[in-house]
Image: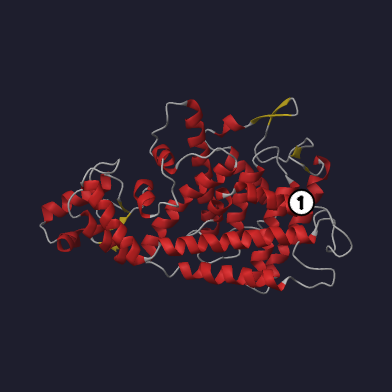
Amino acid sequence: MYFTPILPIDIKGNLDQELLSLAEEVCIKSAALSGSHNMHILHSIKDLLRKTNSYYSNKIESEGTHPLDIEKAMRKDFSSDKHEKKLQLLSLAHIDVQKYIEALFLKGATSNIYSKEFLLELHKEFYTKEGMDNFLDIHYEDKDVRMLPGRVREDDVYIGSHVAPKFSELDTMLRSFESEYSKIYTASTKALKLLYVLSAHHRLVWIHPFLDGNGRVSRLFLDASFMDMKLEGYGLWNISRGLARESDAYKKHLSLADMKLQGATDGRGPLSLRGLSYYLRYMLETSLDQIAFMSKNLELSSLGHKIDKFVFLSQQGMLHTKPLPKYSSALFKELLIEGEVARGKVKDIINKGDRTATTLIKTLSEMNYLESDTPKSAIKLKLNAEFASYLMPDLIPSK
């Protein structure tokens, strides 16, 4: 049926137990990240990772915008260069759709995400954001075409060596995609669900339902799939960073899973079981690598030491930022441990009077290191891109 096998199941009907064990390891280690810090710090990390996810997902398409420039765009501080501004808007659109997806799951009203309707909705949501009109004019095969957001393509296309399915077959194919991958909802374990999710990501890329944006939308769909299966800890790590670090390897493994059946023992479908298995191993190992990376970077003692050093270098004028005020380090480390602090308690943390504490809060808030729900509510640490690039230098590249 077009793109089977949908899972790494051999001709005898046996699921690949080695891949299942790897998937279980991903689920266990991902969940462990959720207990690494208080909820407010975890929220700040997730907020940061939305920006880095946007950066890395777009970088796979060779159009990445640095997180520092993304933050500027979020403050409506756009580049004077038209191309750079265009990429800033692209990143903002990606972040907005991530938030849109998260909101759907928070409301608990999400329909079957494997449906054609949800996929079209995701594409439309992305390509109708501010600035995305610039990405709707597509040139390919000596033709200029205006892409319609949320509409399947009406042309036959090829991508590299992959000849995408004919556009006349897309409706049937997307209905088959929904039918096959909706089986995830009856899967018995998280590990099995993860194999469904990662397999579906490739099959969606293989179907190539849209004229453009298939890579970005399929990775947004992958994020939605992780949330849909309730992969605990996801959002504190993100797979796009691992895929972007060696994007050629990612594309190579997608291509391996594109392979047609390679002989009588290569599964029970038109596509290669071995190709799918190679791809799944790569995706699972990439996930484990990213989980390990974030686990290391979120170690409390290491973060505390890095905060001290960051504040010291800032105050010595050795960074590209405005020097942080005195007592910043003590407040940052308290927030790292406690998550949030009542404004009235800041004077006790720094052992100074009300006026000094109030000035410190005001200055750090203006410098984008603190945030709060209201002007009078408790303060929380904000991991802006500049701060995070020092605390986690391998997460945010130097500029």
Q: Position of residue 295 (x, y in %)?
A: 45, 64
Q: Residue at x 63, y 43 (%)?
A: 123
Query: Callout 1: few (<14), some (14-19), or many (20+) C-alpha neighbours within 10 Å?
Result: many
Left or right of 331 in this view: 238: right
Q: Residue furthest right?
A: 264
Circle 1 residue: 258
Quarter placement of the C terminus: top left
Residue 140 vs residue 132, the one in the foreground: 140
Amino acid of disc 1: Asp
Image position of 390 (left or right of 61): left
Q: Where does the image place residue 194, in percent across and percent down from the top left?
A: 64, 65
* Closer to the camera in the image, 312 or 107: 312
Q: Residue 228: percent from the left, percent from the top?
A: 60, 61
User: What kind of element bears circle 1?
Assistant: helix
Q: Residue at x 57, y 29 (%)?
A: 134
Q: Quadrant of residue 17?
A: bottom right
Q: Is 314 on the left-hand or right-hand side of 143?
A: left
Residue ID at (36%, 54%): 391
Q: Nearer the viewer, residue 82 or 150?
A: 82
**In the rendered view, would you say 132 is above or below 209?**
above
| Residue 224 visible, this angle | yes
Q: Which quadrant would residue 380 be assigned to in this image?
A: bottom left
**Residue 339 seen in the current view:** no
